Image (tube, rainbow, N blue to C red):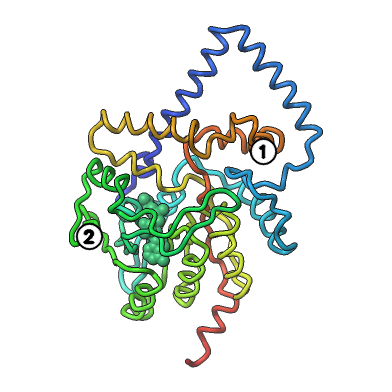
Amino acid sequence: MAAIDRQTVDHTDLHRLWKAIAIGIGLAVVVMAPALMAAVGILAVVLLCGRMLYRGGDRFIPNLYARDTRSYDKAYGAFIRQSLASLRTKKIAGHTLLWEASRLPAPPVDGAPELVLDLGVWIGWSTRLAAEASGRKVYGFDTFTGLVEDWQIDDQTLIKQGTFSISEPFARQFIRDTGVSLDGGVPTALGRDVEFIQGSTYDTLEPFLTERPGAAIRLFHMDLDTYESCLHALETCKDRFVEGSILVFDEYLVTNGEMRAFYEFQERYGLEWKYRAWGLEIMEMNVHMVASPVKRLWYAFDWISRYWLRGDGRYVWQVLDKRFWRFWLGAPIGDIIFMLGAAGQRKSVSIEITGLGGLQRSRSQPA
Ligand SMILES: C[S@@+](CC[C@H](N)C(=O)[O-])C[C@H]1O[C@@H](n2cnc3c(N)ncnc32)[C@H](O)[C@@H]1O
């Protein structure tokens, strides 16, 4: 198999640009404004003292610092705590999906076919880039008319059903600027080894698998966002998971969404598994696909400023928001550095199935 250039595969220029800006701001404070530096120093000392007194450190999820995880039942609360302890040892700088796709072994020459599934593709770049990174055919599933149910992100934002339709102005702009073309309302492959399957996964996933009997799922990328769609997809695919299957969840750190769905799924079947990586979700890499270098730079600056000034990154500086205090007083120093290093979400996690547990038994039982 041809060697893959991981730098190219990861598409993290936007985050490198942000790091350069952040270092520049830091240097400007040090060199240009001693008074400002003194103020930052005093603030740092106050925060350090506050950190010693603060008791809520492990109760909030990095990136969201939203709902107190003690509001969940004991078993799920323990799962969240163990998950975070494990994930903190698995941080990666790049996009979890592309990191995993570029590490897949070559497909078997003979023997049963293996599937790479991208669930929730929007304008299709996650699918195309996963195909490039893995050297395998990738099947992408989407309604192309947006979410099929409302998506409540913890106790934060409600994203309405129908959001992420590719006919929205935001999507049309990205379609134009990243050179995507549509055929009958479905994005085209643009020369990559991909196939897009249009429709709700509630209707399309099962017939798709029935048409490919015996094919194991090698890589399962979940970006359908909602708890309901995620759990349905896991259940529908359950008999195709094998030891070594990799599951990437784009929004794993949403505790009432993908994490909850996976928690219930693995409990139900006594699945054995381990965490592999915690990195960037895939959405920002759409910026890297903007064809014109000048526009790309503009998009990158726009994205960075939106994220820090108006987006989820506001918890870093909005003192009146509880999340500010949870982050600066409670987050482990390693998390603070990790979070500040990206102008976008770090919610994506990968998991490897290491033992099938009850899924093995359900497979061996006659239908
Ligand atoms: C966040 S977007 C995916 C982003 C994409 N992976 C990317 O890299 O740009 C979520 C997508 O999931 C789709 N979706 C959500 N629930 C679905 C379902 N049950 N069946 C099919 N598509 C669904 C939406 O239409 C939307 O395009």
Q: In the picture shown, does residue 279 fall above or below 334?
A: below
Kindly identify the residue that appears in the image at 29 percent across and 66 percent down. 198
Q: Looking at the picture, how far across and down is residue 202, in whole percent? A: 41, 73
Q: Amino acid at mark 2?
A: Gly
- Of 8 and 186, the residue lying toward us: 186
Q: Between marks 2 and 1, how big is the CA–CA gap?
A: 43 Å
Q: Which residue is mark 2?
A: 185
Quadrant of the image where one finds ligand 1? bottom left
Query: Residue 57 falls in which quadrant of the image?
Result: top right
Q: Looking at the picture, how far across and down is residue 117, in whole percent? A: 38, 64
Kindly identify the residue that appears in the image at 57 percent across and 11 percent down. 30
- Of 31 and 352, the residue lying toward us: 31
Q: Quadrant of the N terminus?
A: bottom left
Kindly identify the residue that appears in the image at 32 percent across and 68 percent down. 199
Q: In the picture shown, does residue 79 fall above or below 49?
A: below
Q: Residues within 10 Å of mark 2 (few under 14, many from 20)?
A: few
- Residue 283 visible in rendering: yes
Q: Is residue 52 left or right of residue 97?
A: right
Kindly identify the residue that appears in the image at 39 percent across and 54 percent down. 163
Q: Looking at the picture, how far across and down is residue 351, in whole percent? A: 53, 59
- In what element is the residue under mark 2? loop
Q: Looking at the picture, how far across and down is residue 182, in whole percent? A: 20, 55
Label ID, residue 74 = none
Mark positioned earlier in the residue sequence (2 or 1):
2
Q: Residues within 10 Å of mark 1 (few under 14, many from 20)?
A: few
Q: Which residue is mark 1?
A: 322
Q: In the picture shown, does residue 220 fall above or below 44?
A: below
Q: Amino acid at mark 1?
A: Lys
Query: Residue 185 falls in which quadrant of the image?
Result: bottom left
- Residue 116 visible in rendering: no
